[in-house]
Image: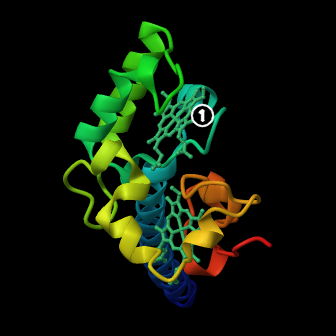
Amino acid sequence: MAQKNKHHQEINMKEFFGLILLTLVLLAAIALASKHANAGSKSRQLTQPLPVYQTECGSCHLAYPPAFLPKSSWEQLMSTLSKHYGTDASIDAKSNHQINQWLTQYGGSYKRVKESPPENRITKSAWFERKHRKVKTSDFMKPSVKSPANCAACHQRAEQGLFDDDDVRIPD
Ligand code: HEC
Ligand code: HEC
């Protein structure tokens, strides 16, 4: 009888420590998973597309990432759409409001994006000129590129908001 009880206790101790170990492993896994999820959502926040922005502002050119212009520039652009770089890009008031809110929420978060560049152009920003100082003017003017504003001609993953050096190729 005593023998049997001892056996029982041993099993219980094993199970007990087993459970503690399992709990610790699970807690560690949860901590790791939530850390990853947070990092992911943080980086995605900047590129998470707003569907109405993609349709209204991505039809004539790239739907430029909000991070590349300061909030003040986005506000000026959104309030002067009927006179938009020589074209009329007006949209309905509701979409305008939605887009304006989203742009000013995520605007100006790229390195050294602070004051409004001339003409509220990304391509006239000091950081843009610095990053592209090795790109020849003739490359920006090629028929396959047409304009410095045509980011996607050279930045292969511009549509996904990715502008790394690794994804750049000046077309022929
Ligand atoms: C009807 C066509 C059209 C639509 C729609 C349009 N744009 Fe443009 N946009 C242009 C043209 C044309 C330019 C000048 C491009 C160039 O210089 O090569 C331009 C330029 C820009 C630039 C400056 C690019 C640079 O040189 O850095 C920004 C920023 C911009 N648009 C934002 C927007 C936003 C925001 C919307 C949506 C509300 C929008 N655009 C909708 C035609 C359009
Ligand atoms: C004619 C091709 C071309 C066009 C058009 C162009 N770029 Fe670039 N861009 C380059 C090249 C090439 C580099 C890398 C320069 C270097 O490494 O010296 C670069 C670098 C960059 C970088 C820095 C990347 C890094 O990792 O530091 C950013 C950001 C960028 N471009 C954004 C833009 C945006 C936004 C537009 C459009 C408004 C644009 N570019 C238009 C060719 C282009």
Tell me: residue 123, above or below residue 51.
Answer: below
Residue 117: % across, % down = 28, 51
> For the residue marked with disc 1, what is the amino acid?
Gln
Residue 159: % across, % down = 64, 52
Work out whether residue 107 can be spotted: no
Instruction: Please identify the quarter of the rendering in which residue 131 is found.
Output: bottom left
- Is 149 in front, or is 101? 149
Residue beneath the point at 52% across and 21% down:
89
Element at label 1: helix
Tell me the quarter of the image containing the C terminus: bottom right
Which residue was labeled with disc 1? 54
Within 10 Å of disc 1 (Cα), the crowding (few <14, some 14-19, many 20+) is some
Q: Along the horizontal axis of the image, is 92 left or right of 79?
A: right
Residue beneath the point at 57% across and 63% down:
162
- Is 163 in front, or is 119? 119
Ligand 1 within 8 Å of the CB at mark 1: no
Extreme top residue here?
A: 93
Tell me: residue 151, above or below residue 118.
Answer: below
Tell me the quarter of the image containing the N terminus: bottom right
Residue 164: % across, % down = 55, 74
Q: Along the horizontal axis of the image, is 170 left or right of 79?
A: right
Residue beneath the point at 54% across and 52% down:
149
Residue 139: % across, % down = 64, 71
- Is 74 in front, or is 101? 74
